[in-house]
Image (tube, helix red, strand yellow):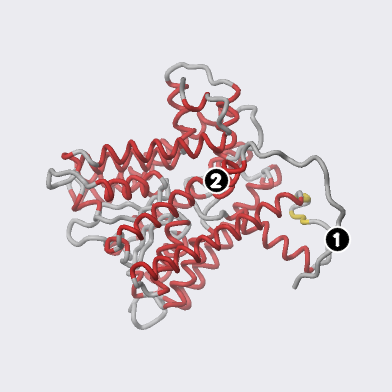
């Protein structure tokens, strides 16, 4: 009997185990001799790290993807990225539908939990929409990128490069095949190329706003008033984060004499740097050359991440929006959190606060442990920690040189960041008895 039909497991536990099983399968495949260019296969530690990074669509690597892995190894990584971007449960439902199997109530419920759908009805149709959207967007992205890569690399290699980067960008993974001439260069060779940068940025954005938001856009078009409140918050918050990031990087970072960029080049670099930390892992400039304040700003963008039910990670833009709305509620002396003519339940603010604190503590603890274990500068360690828990994949160059203990820590952070804080908490607390009473209320002074 499939593991998702076991009635003893809660939906959160099923999601957690699904990711574990997929990571282990990916690890086994990457250890095969013909997955690496030297024909020896990857060691268990390297394979586990790479499989986890691919499944969690993070993009942190201990070996350059282009120069270390063979074509078969790259294909395995691409399949893992696709599975991780869609989500384990979405993949399971898609396979079952294609095989003609009937999707039962329990599997529909698990699917609803995995993509944060508002209701159970129509969940199978939504799965079909997700698959069609993924295939259409990734194919279009690959076709556009092929216009650049095929003339440069030849037809066969160019098409593979275009497909790989299109899937990696839409799934917010950040794996790249640019390291043939020099390892770990990402898209720095295309910093002034509008075609590559804009297509990659568009794919990152579409994957990061979530499938439910894309479904709202498809259903209602420009009639934004008919969108669900979650979609409105995601679109507004995403726009403000990208616009704010663009303005910061354009006027503060890329106007420095160090970069020697024209205004159009600076604008393109600023836009890409504002989008990529949401949570893609591509970089078009040397991150180590950024001003420390720009590196700190990138860390903040990485922690916020993308939207619920998307291919990205982080503590999510909706969490960020709810927290800001909660602050506004206090300043305006309101009794409840409200926006767009709707009132948010108190439990939503409680969940957002708890999730934010959980991510913040793990980020800080991870950074401090990395610094202590490998004697890394604090900025480098915190950058690595934020990139892992936000499933981003950006790095200041420390990842390939981490010790085994630090790699294990990064693996744990990547896994937590992709599965989701609430999923982990619900899985741990599943089955706990709920108290049927309430204590008397008493206020406590805060602030």
- Return the residue at label 1: 442
Q: Position of residue 332 (x, y in %)?
A: 81, 67
* Residue sitting farthest toward the bottom: 257
In front of the other: 86 or 431: 431
The quarter of the picture where residue 31 lies is top left
Mark 2 vs mark 1: which is more N-terminal? 2
Local SS, label 1: loop
Q: Position of residue 165 (x, y in %)?
A: 32, 48
The quarter of the picture where residue 79 lies is top left
Local SS, label 2: helix
**How many marks can you see?**
2
Q: Position of residue 154 (x, y in %)?
A: 17, 46
188 lies left or right of 281: left
The answer to whether residue 239 is above or below residue 69 is below
In front of the other: 163 or 225: 163
Marks 2/1 in contact by CB < 8 Å: the verdict is no
Tell me what residue is drawn at x 48 percent, y 50 percent.
416
Tell me what residue is drawn at x 46 percent, y 23 percent.
2
125 lies left or right of 294: right
Tell me what residue is drawn at x 48 percent, y 17 percent.
101
Q: Position of residue 349 (x, y in %)?
A: 71, 54
Marks 2 and 1 sit apart, C-alpha to C-alpha, by: 31 Å
Return the mark for residue 424: 2
Tell me what residue is drawn at x 43 percent, y 60 percent.
387
In front of the other: 125 or 347: 347
């Amino acid at each position: 009997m499939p593991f998702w039909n076991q009635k003893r497991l809660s939906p959160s536990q099923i999601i957690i185990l699904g990711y574990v099983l997929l990571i282990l399968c990916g690890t086994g495949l990457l250890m095969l001799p013909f997955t690496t260019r030297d024909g020896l296969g990857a060691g268990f530690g390297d394979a586990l790290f790479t499989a986890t990074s691919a499944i969690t669509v993070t993009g942190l690597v201990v070996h350059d993807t282009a120069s270390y892995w063979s074509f078969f190894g790259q294909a395995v990584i691409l399949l893992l990225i696709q599975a991780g971007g869609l989500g384990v449960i979405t993949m399971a439902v898609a396979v079952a539908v294609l095989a003609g199997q009937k999707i039962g109530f329990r599997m529909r419920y698990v699917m609803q939990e995995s993509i944060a759908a508002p209701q159970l009805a129509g969940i199978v149709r939504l799965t079909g929409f997700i698959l069609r959207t993924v295939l259409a967007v990734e194919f279009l992205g690959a076709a556009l990128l092929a216009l650049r890569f095929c003339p440069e690399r030849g037809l066969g290699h160019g098409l593979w490069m275009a497909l790989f980067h299109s899937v990696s960008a839409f799934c917010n993974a950040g794996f790249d095949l640019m390291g043939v001439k020099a390892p770990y260069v990402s898209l720095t060779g295309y910093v002034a190329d509008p075609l590559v940068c804009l297509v990659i940025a568009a794919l990152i954005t579409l994957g990061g706003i979530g499938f439910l938001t894309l479904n709202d856009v498809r259903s209602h078009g420009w009639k934004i008033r008919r969108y669900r409140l979650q979609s409105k918050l995601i679109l507004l918050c995403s726009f403000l984060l990208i616009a704010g990031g663009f303005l910061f990087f354009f006027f503060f970072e890329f106007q420095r004499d160090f970069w020697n960029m024209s205004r159009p080049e600076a604008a393109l670099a600023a836009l890409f740097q504002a989008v990529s930390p949401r949570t893609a892992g591509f970089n078009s400039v040397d991150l180590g050359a950024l001003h420390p304040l720009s590196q700190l700003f990138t860390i903040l963008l990485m922690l916020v991440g993308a939207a619920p039910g998307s291919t990205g990670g982080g503590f999510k833009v909706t969490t960020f929006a709810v927290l800001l709305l909660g602050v506004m509620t206090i300043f305006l002396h309101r009794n409840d959190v409200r926006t767009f003519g709707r009132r948010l339940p108190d439990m939503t603010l409680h969940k957002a606060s708890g999730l934010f604190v959980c991510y913040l503590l793990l980020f800080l603890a991870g950074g401090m442990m990395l610094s202590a274990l490998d004697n890394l500068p604090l900025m480098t360690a915190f950058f690595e920690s934020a990139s892992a828990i936000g499933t981003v994949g950006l790095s200041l160059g420390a990842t390939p040189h981490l010790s085994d203990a630090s790699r294990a820590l990064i693996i744990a952070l990547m896994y937590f960041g992709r599965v989701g804080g609430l999923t982990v908490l619900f899985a741990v607390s599943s089955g706990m008895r709920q108290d049927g009473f309430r204590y008397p209320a008493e206020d406590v002074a805060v602030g």
